[in-house]
Structures are given as structure tokens and as C-alpha cells.
Image (spheres, grey):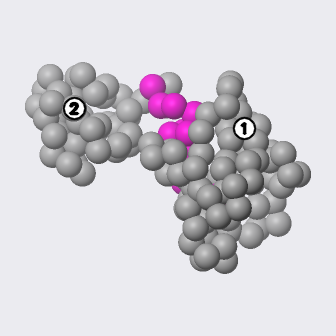
């Protein structure tokens, strides 16, 4: 395999060399299914950069961000509900609770990656 670090290959380059998305096998648009794992970090949206499992400051698992779908899937402790996520400006996101209609805004910080929510909670991206 010529390319070992797929983070360095753009969507256009993947299509040009005939490299397909591993999830959907689409040659025309390798990312049509939402798989962003091959894109460079600077090409990702804020929500895509937040993908992964999140824990609250006290260690409580909160859920998983699926950024390409604009969704937070809550952990089992929160009944596996799904909530909508959207970008709300530079380094800001908005979470809409489907079951209650409540809206929370969060400020995103780096190093370590964390979100400070409008209700006072602080979540960290689980690096494990």
C-alpha cells in the first residue's frame, strides 16, 4: 500500500487515484457516507473534530459525538437518547435535547479538548 497515513490524502486525491471509502465503496465521492476519517484535521468541521466519547469532569460517561451527523448519542445512563448538535459560531456548539426541547450552548477549548456548557458542566474528550 503506497499511502500509509490516510490523514494526508484529500477527498479529491483519493478519487483521482481510485481510492474508495472503506465504508461505502464510492469512487466518485469517497466521503458521501459521512466517513471523515481520511480527511486532514484542518478540513474537518468543528463537529467532526469533536467526534468520539465524552466524559464529564467527574468521570461520568456522557455519550458519543457523531459530528458528521450532527448528533450526540447519550450513554446508557441517559437512556441512549440522541440529541442534535450544531455549530453556533467560532468554537461554539449548540445542543438541543430532543426529549425536553432544552437548548444548551457550549464553548469548545483545546489542549485538552473540552466543552464548557452553559449549565456549568465541563466535558472532556476521552482520549483512551
Q: Position of residue 98 (x, y in %)?
A: 62, 58
Compared with 108, 56 (above or below) is: below
Q: For the point 70% across and 61% down, which residue is it?
A: 100
Quadrant where the C terminus is found in the figure:
bottom right
Compared with 82, 46 (above or below) is: above
Quadrant where the N terminus is found in the figure:
top left
Q: Position of residue 18 (x, y in %)?
A: 11, 31
Q: Which residue is mark 2?
A: 29
Label 1 sits on a secondary structure element that is strand
User: Is residue 46 within the magenta segment?
Assistant: yes
Q: Which residues are magenta?
A: 43-55
Q: Is 71 situated left or right of 10 in this image? A: right
Q: For the point 73% across and 48% down, which residue is it?
A: 103
Q: For the point 51% across and 31% down, which residue is it?
A: 45
Front residue of 57 and 63: 63
Estimate how packed mark 1 is, as few (under 14), some (14 to 19) or many (20 or more) residues with alpha carbons within 10 Å.
some
Q: Earlier in the sequence, mark 1 or mark 2?
A: 2
Q: Is 69 situated left or right of 104 in this image? A: left
Front residue of 33 and 49: 33
Q: Position of residue 71 (x, y in %)?
A: 53, 51
> Where, by quadrant of the figure, is residue 9 drawn?
top left
Estimate how packed mark 2 is, as few (under 14), some (14 to 19) or many (20 or more) residues with alpha carbons within 10 Å.
some
Label 2 sits on a secondary structure element that is loop
Q: Which residue is mark 1?
A: 108
- Asked if residue 111 can be seen in this view, the reply is no
Q: For the point 59% across and 45% down, which residue is it?
A: 85
Compared with 72, 43 (above or below) is: above
Q: Is 19 situated left or right of 66 in this image? A: left
Front residue of 24 and 59: 24
Label 1 – label 2 distance at C-alpha: 30 Å
Q: Residue furthest right?
A: 120
Amino acid at each position: 500500500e503506497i499511502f500509509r497515513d490516510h490523514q494526508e490524502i484529500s477527498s479529491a486525491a483519493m478519487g483521482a487515484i481510485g481510492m474508495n471509502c472503506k465504508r461505502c465503496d464510492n469512487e466518485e465521492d469517497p466521503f458521501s457516507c459521512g466517513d471523515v476519517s481520511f480527511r486532514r484535521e484542518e478540513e474537518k468541521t468543528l463537529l467532526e473534530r469533536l467526534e468520539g466519547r465524552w466524559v464529564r469532569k467527574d468521570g461520568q460517561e456522557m455519550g458519543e459525538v457523531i459530528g458528521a451527523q450532527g448528533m450526540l448519542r447519550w450513554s446508557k445512563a441517559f437512556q441512549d437518547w440522541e440529541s442534535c448538535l450544531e455549530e453556533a459560531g467560532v468554537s461554539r456548539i449548540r445542543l438541543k435535547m430532543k426529549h425536553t426541547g432544552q437548548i444548551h450552548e457550549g464553548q469548545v477549548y483545546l489542549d485538552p479538548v473540552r466543552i464548557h456548557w452553559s449549565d456549568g458542566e465541563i466535558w472532556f474528550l476521552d482520549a483512551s
